[in-house]
Amino acid sequence: MTGWDSWQSTWAGASGPLPDVRARAQREASRHRRTQVTVLLLAAIASLGAVPAFAAPEGAVHAIGWAILAFGAAMGIGFLVIQRGVGSWRFAGPREALGFLERRLGAELRMARLVRWVYLGMCLFGGIATQVLYIEHASPLSVRLMTLGCFLFGVTLAFFVPWWFGRIARRRQAELDRWRSWIDEQGL
Amino acid sequence: MDFEQCLREHGPALWRVIASYAPGGQERDDLAQEVLVAVWQALPRFRGESSAKTFLLRIAHNRCLSHAWQRARRPSSSDVDLVELPDPRPGADDQLASHQRTERFLGHLRTLPLGQRQVLALALEGLSHAEIAALVGITPENVAVRLGRAREALRRSLEKEAA
């Protein structure tokens, strides 16, 4: 028997017990389904918050209602699109997976910047619209200041999201770089 | 194809892939769990674009590479080979000798760099150069080069032990 045949015979004869993972796999699948339902439920609840706005006679309040609905829909649809994307990953090797992760990191950074400006726009619009309504209805100053404070907090938060995300992204990029060096070392 | 049928037909091939990455004991058991859960999750996406065996080997190798990466970051004490105790049943000596021969061979295989180990394991599994190329994501020429180097390295490692 030649060396290769002997190796192949040893290899083919190698076998051992495999664990029964059905219970664990079912648990993970149901946890995945629960997460999906929870996120969609939260998006639906957020959207329900818009319903009272449509009962008001003012057009500005309706606009706020539409903005909340758009936010809920974007969250729900975005989540489903991401989930579908996760399910359809197909990589031939680790380099493709690494390339994908780098592209995704770049997309997430761009998304963080987009969120900054969209959320900033929403807060400015919401802040101005509510102040206009409060003035029309001669609402107390304390209510006006509190609402304004909430919107300013939202603006500050939105402004710092990309900065905070950038810090996380740098750590993840460093990890991907270490992964790339290891792939090179292993000749993959 | 359902999960049970998949394990009946390709379970031994999956076990061999796992054993070529994990030395044994708890580490091998944990990796086997990871691979089988990944197979369970991936099976509904199987569309018959490749053979079932190629599909499963791709999942197993990719999951094992992730494991090897985690292991490289956090080396554990499970690198030490386990001591086998003799089995008192009749014919157990032959079984033990065969088991030890297999584990020794797998131990030598695990000393190869992953790029070579992966190609050699798939060739031993009976896949053609074209199938290995498609599975690993390299050209068939590159498969031939890696396979040649892997065979040479494995032969040297086995000879070194014999000497």
Image (cartoon, rainbow, N blue to C red):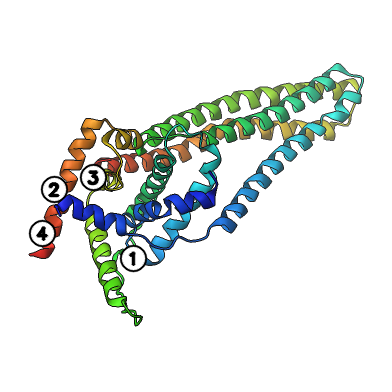
* Mark 2, secondary structure of its residue: helix
Q: CA distance from mark 3 to mark 2?
A: 10 Å
Q: CA distance from mark 3 to mark 1?
A: 22 Å
Instruction: Name the outermost residue toward the bottom.
Output: B88
Relative vertical location of residue A88 with respect to residue B98 in this rendering, above or below:
above
Q: Which residue is mark 3?
A: B116
Relative vertical location of residue A170 with respect to residue A65 in this rendering, above or below:
below
Q: CA distance from mark 4 to mark 1?
A: 25 Å
Indicate which disc, 3 or 2, sits on the residue closer to the N terminus. 3
Relative vertical location of residue B107 with respect to residue A159 in this rendering, above or below:
below
Q: Which residue is mark 2?
A: B152
Work out whether residue B154 or residue B68 is closer to the camera in this orientation and state it. Answer: B154
* Mark 1, secondary structure of its residue: helix
- Quadrant of residue A66 within the rendered picture: top right
Q: Which residue is mark 1?
A: B78
Residue A78 in the image, given as x and y percentages of width and height: 63, 30
Work out whether residue A132 or residue A48 is closer to the camera in this orientation and state it. Answer: A48
Work out whether residue B41 or residue A186 is closer to the camera in this orientation and state it. Answer: B41
* Mark 4, secondary structure of its residue: helix
Q: Which image quadrant: the C terminus of chain A? A: top left
Q: Are marks 3 and 1 in contact (CB under 8 Å)?
A: no
Q: Which residue is mark 4?
A: B159
- Same chain for mark 3 and mark 1? The answer is yes
Identity of the residue drawn at 66% across and 29% down: A77
- Label 2 neighbourhood size at 10 Å, few (<14), some (14-19), many (20+)? few
Q: Chain of mark 3?
A: B
Identity of the residue drawn at 83% across and 19% down: A60
Q: CA distance from mark 4 to mark 3?
A: 18 Å
Indicate which disc, 3 or 1, sits on the residue closer to the N terminus. 1
Residue A159 in the image, given as x and y percentages of width and height: 58, 30
**Residue type (three-letter) at the residue carrying disc 3:** Gln
